Image (cartoon, rainbow, N blue to C red):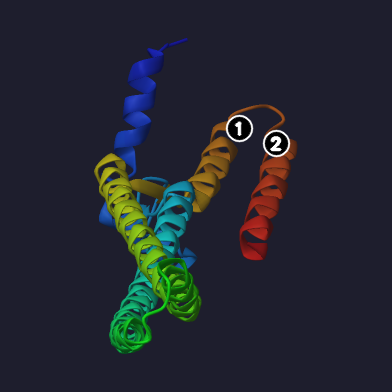
Amino acid sequence: MPTIDTVELAQTYIHRWPAQENVIKDYLRPLGLDTNHGFAKTAVESSEVTKRRTHLEQRLARLKQWAQSASKRGDAASCRRERLRTAYKTRSKELYQELWKYQCALEAQDLPEYVFRQKMKERKAEIDAELEPLGSKEWEAYRQCNKEFEKQERYCREQREVLRALEDLKEQERTMYELDSRKDHAMTVLKVALANLDRPDAGSALHSCRKTATIHFAAEVRT
């Protein structure tokens, strides 16, 4: 009984599908078996790569939105701080002008030194108490401005990291292919059926192959 090397058999089997004669192709066309015999492939995206890319793109979109929001809040805090600083300087100038006038009035009264110092100290405390809220608000606006600026810097830094991750993902991505092996299954069943015709029990074998082929085609129809 003639034998054939396993590798040679596989190579011969693989070669026969794209090398089919036109008459065979014409016969297979009505059966829908003319377009692929297990080797036609369709480029598809890797589900894991797609999932990873989608996650990174969503992360990038959120970081951009957060950076823009932080920038707006920082600008608002900067404007508020400038407004408060101007108000603080204006009010401080007014109060210290009044303090100078008050000092002149006390000096005109020729008060004892300790009385003069006490009254000036009290008036200075009143001025500081009035200016303190304005100074605190200005300082709070300054800290808010710095805080939002730091957030914006962090979000921009993370955006650069995400962009690098997307570039790395693109470089590492490999094209994947999806094989349509339905027709290959059908042709294999038919080949086995023809091979079994030479056996003594060819009738039962052919019936079994027909049954197997029916199961294969039913499964393909359901999918």
Task: Bin the neighbour count of mark 1 within 10 Å (Cα to Cα): few under 14, some 14-19, many 20 and up.
Answer: some
Q: Nearer the viewer, residue 147 or 195?
A: 147
Neighbour tally class for label 2: few under 14, some 14-19, many 20 plus, Cα within 10 Å: some
- Labelled disc at residue 41: none
Tag of residue 196: 1
Q: What's the CA distance linking mark 1 and mark 2?
A: 6 Å
**SS at badge 2:** helix
Q: Secondary structure at mark 1?
A: helix
Position of 32 compared to 15: left or right? right
Question: Which residue is nearer to you in this view: 4 or 181?
Answer: 181
Q: Identify the residue at image location x=29%, y=83%.
A: 100
Question: Residue 140 location, x and y as percent?
Answer: 45, 69
Instruction: Report the residue at 36% width, 81% height from top.
Output: 110
* Whether label 1 touches label 2, CB < 8 Å: yes
Residue 33 relative to residue 157: left or right? right
Which percent across, then down, holds residue 136?
Answer: 46, 71
Q: Answer above or below: position of 150 versus 16.
A: below
Q: Amino acid at mark 1?
A: Asn
Instruction: Report x, y in % for residue 5.
Output: 38, 12
Q: Which quarter of the figure has residue 99?
A: bottom left
Q: Quadrant of residue 212?
A: top right
Residue 112, quarter of the rendered image:
bottom left
Disc 2 marks a residue whose amino acid type is Ala
Depth check, front residue: 220 or 140: 140
Residue at 42% of width from left, 11% of height from top? Answer: 3
Name the image quarter holding the C terminus.
Answer: bottom right
Q: How many marks?
A: 2
User: Mark number for residue 205?
Assistant: 2
Q: Reading the chain from its start, which is encountered first: label 1 or label 2?
A: 1
